[in-house]
Image (spheres, rainbow, N blue to C red):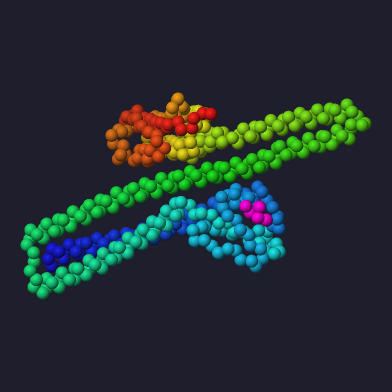
Amino acid sequence: MNSLTRLIGYSLLLLLVFLAATVGAQSWLRRQTHRLRAEAIDSRRAQFEAVLSAVPRPPDKWDDAYLRQLGEMLGVTVTLQVGDATLPSRDAGLLYFEREIGHGAAPPRMARVAFLAPPTSRLLATYQQVTVGLMLFGGILLVAGAFFAMLNWRVADSGGTSPPMHARSRAEMGSLEHLARTSVARGEQLDLERDGRRLAEQDALLKQQLLNQSLEGKIRLGNDLHDGIIQSLYASGLTIESARALARTDPAEADRHLAQCLQHLNATIRDVRNYITGLAPESLRRAGFAQAIESHITELGAGRNLRFDLKFDDEAIARLTPAQTTEALQVAREAISNALRHGGASFVTVRLHQSDREVGLLVQDNGVGFDPASLEKSGHGLGNMQTRASRIGASVRVESQPGSGTRVILTLPLLNQPV
């Protein structure tokens, strides 16, 4: 067996290993896709049940306006089937779940809730298609390699002359060099795709958390309005009715009732103003930023003896754009996680403040620290932080020494100027 035949045999062996790994990746991606779709459906189903409990309506009152209201609150499309009527055909690009409305009602009613699949699920589906393409390409290469190996073996058996030794050596070295370069390029591409997928998953998770918080806030606001302000107005109405009844028989008592009603109405007006102030976009953004940081700290510090010092400038948060707020949250979460997981810190300081032209975010810990020169190999996630900062035109700096803790400083330009 000559050198060319051996090289083709080695190449076929590598192709077989590649195809086996591709088949395994395809199976894993399929399972992950099914799992993510099931989790998305379960999450939407729970949100749908929460909204139904907050804004209930009898089954026979489910009109088009009510269906649109449910869809706008959840960001979905709700359709209703009554009796034997058929629902619209399903769209392959959407996820669905169905719920019976009014058990035992006549005629029976079934609601279908449709929504877009999460970005991570669609990304995994794309990876599945790419994997199938790679499997087909590998299969073609395998067949072609086997054909050329068989052809070369027959030529060698028929007495064909072999090329000079140095020519064969150069050809083998050139093939190995090409194979090595191809392997390195594929490895770098896979690393980039893996980092991009992780960033996309983190963004999707944060957006889902913010959506859940927004939905919970709407439900809580509805309950507060019903139990507080509406009940106060109802009580004031009763007081006015009693004053009207006493106006002719006991004017003094009627006047006292009206004065009491006026006090209740003024208190209700103050409550309404407080609700309006709390619903302003700047207030929501400030509460969302601080709540997200505190929620992340609570999750990481469960059962551990940790201390945190948090100070946020509300005006600085209000001047950040939504994109800057999202990326700043992710950088802060990454820095806090690194401080606890890699640095072993017991005290973490988080600051957000502004100057004339920029907003600064500081995350400082008392951990073991590290050598910044070896940061690319230490797994502290600086690459992710740099990527997020570049998206919004910001800059990130890491300062650390072994035994002296770590400082992560994110500087964001001010794009929202005060009115």
Q: Tell me if residue 257 comes above or below residue 205 in the rendering.
A: above
Q: Which of 246 and 38 is in front in this view?
A: 246
Q: Does the magenta stretch include residue 56?
A: no
* Left or right, residue 56 beside residue 184: right
* Left or right, residue 113 beside residue 119: right
Q: Tell me if residue 236 comes above or below residue 176 in the rendering.
A: above
Answer yes or no: is residue 381 visible.
no
Q: Which residue lies furthest to the top in this view?
A: 356
Q: Which of 14 and 141 is in front in this view?
A: 141
Give how far across and how far down residue 284 sits, in percent: 56, 36
Q: Is residue 64 magenta?
A: yes
Q: What stretch is highlighted in magenta?
A: 63-68
Give how far across and how far down residue 365 sits, in percent: 40, 30
Res 202 → quadrant: top left
Image quadrant where one finds the N terminus: bottom left
* Left or right, residue 123 beside residue 111: left
Write the residue at 35% across / 59% down.
131
